[in-house]
Image (tube, grey):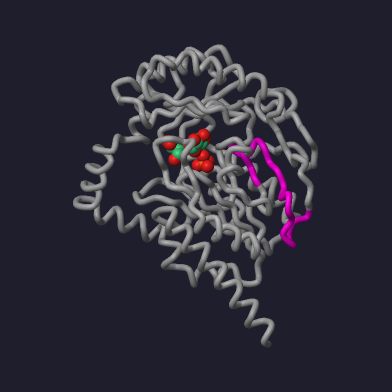
Amino acid sequence: MTKQNVVAPEAVAIPYPPLRVASSTAAPGGGGAAGYPIPRKLLTKLELGGATNGWVESMLASSPTHAKASAAAAVAAAALDGNTSSWTVKHPSALELFDEITKMSKGKRIVMFLDYDGTLSPIVDDPDLAFMSDAMRTAVRNVARCFPTAIVTGRRLDKVYEFVRLAELYYAGSHGMDIKGPVKGPRHAKTKTKAVLFQPASEFLPMIDEVYKALLVKTRSIPGVKVENNKFCASVHFRCVDEKRWSALAEQVRSVLKEYPKLRLTQGRKVLEIRPTIKWDKGKALEFLLESLGFADNEEVFPVYIGDDRTDEDAFKVLRDRGQGFGILVSKYPKETNASYSLQEPSEVMNFLHRLVEWKRSSLKHHSRV
Ligand SMILES: O=P(O)(O)OC[C@H]1O[C@H](O[C@H]2O[C@H](CO)[C@@H](O)[C@H](O)[C@H]2O)[C@H](O)[C@@H](O)[C@@H]1O
């Protein structure tokens, strides 16, 4: 594999292309965004050395089997209680500290960013069946009535829209590489257009399509594998692949990727994600959306990003670096994260959204009385 097939684990302070509303905006150059190469120092164990051993290690480390996960959870609960509680001190429950959160946001404009899988819908074996409940849809709709709200996801935009079905939201699909404004505008939306706001990887469209087809062919002999075309990126799911075959799968993916030096690999929850080497991620999408909403240099904006996956860390980090708002990690287990708070699962996310709406409505009532 060439050195360009890399994961870029950390956001690098590279300026992204200027804000514009365009039907299709290609990042020039095709290396990093605007032609920036990804620095060598950012290579990780996942891709170094050209061998797939590192990939498999990383797949195992981040995706233990159910049996191992329960064993690990039991060990964590029994033996590492001290560590776990120190994690919850560092990343307390956003529900338990709800009052603290609303105090911090007082007088500021909350903007909500919501990941989809594992945040608004529970993780299931078949990605095509990751439906969102009606109750969750109502919670998101109500939140969007109070605050500008965006869904930021690795999925292709049309697919996530089929699941969410709320026209009043912003959507950033393909890990932020496909951004659209609301079709039906809530009062805070500046645009009511169907036009695409931003597609920084549009030149990669034919390449992703080609890679998707190649991955389908290469991996078809491996039972349980699922390849998904996410428009500006592709996903190879190994959730239903026997662990003994992970190494073979990694090898097949590597053999396809080595022909595409302009693509890189990242990893999510039991999924290998193939994406352009442009320096664009969920963090950049968050910044882009804040700018689109007119909050670029606004000290009074208070962005809240809720997500469960490694790819959400880019957005958590942006908020931490900006010192604005915060991230909430959805996880039952301690994980290294740039998020400030935690919620255990999508049902807690729903409660949190309900509480935000109640709080906003009661503060509006209070203000109309005084
Ligand atoms: O950014 P997200 O909204 O979290 O999307 C990331 C990936 O999510 C989906 O895969 C994950 O959820 C599936 C359904 O629960 C699950 O089967 C899979 O193991 C998870 O990785 C989606 O299918 C991918 O395309 C997204 O990239």
Q: Is residue 9 visible?
A: no
User: In the rendered view, does 318 fall on the left or right side of 369?
Assistant: left
User: In the rendered view, does 148 fall on the left or right side of 100?
Assistant: right
Coordinates of residue 280 in the picture (x, y in percent): 63, 35
Residue at 67% x, 24% y is 205
- Which range is magenta? 171-190
Coordinates of residue 82 in the picture (x, y in percent): 26, 56
Query: Can residue 87 be found in the magenta stretch?
Result: no
Coordinates of residue 85 in the picture (x, y in percent): 31, 58
Coordinates of residue 335 in the picture (x, y in percent): 38, 46
Residue at 77% x, 32% y is 24
In this rendered view, identify the residue nearer to me: 7 or 274: 274
- Locate the C terminus by quadrant: bottom right
Query: Can residue 189 be found in the magenta stretch?
Result: yes
Residue at 28% x, 41% y is 69
In this rendered view, identify the residue nearer to me: 171 or 184: 184
Residue at 68% x, 29% y is 201
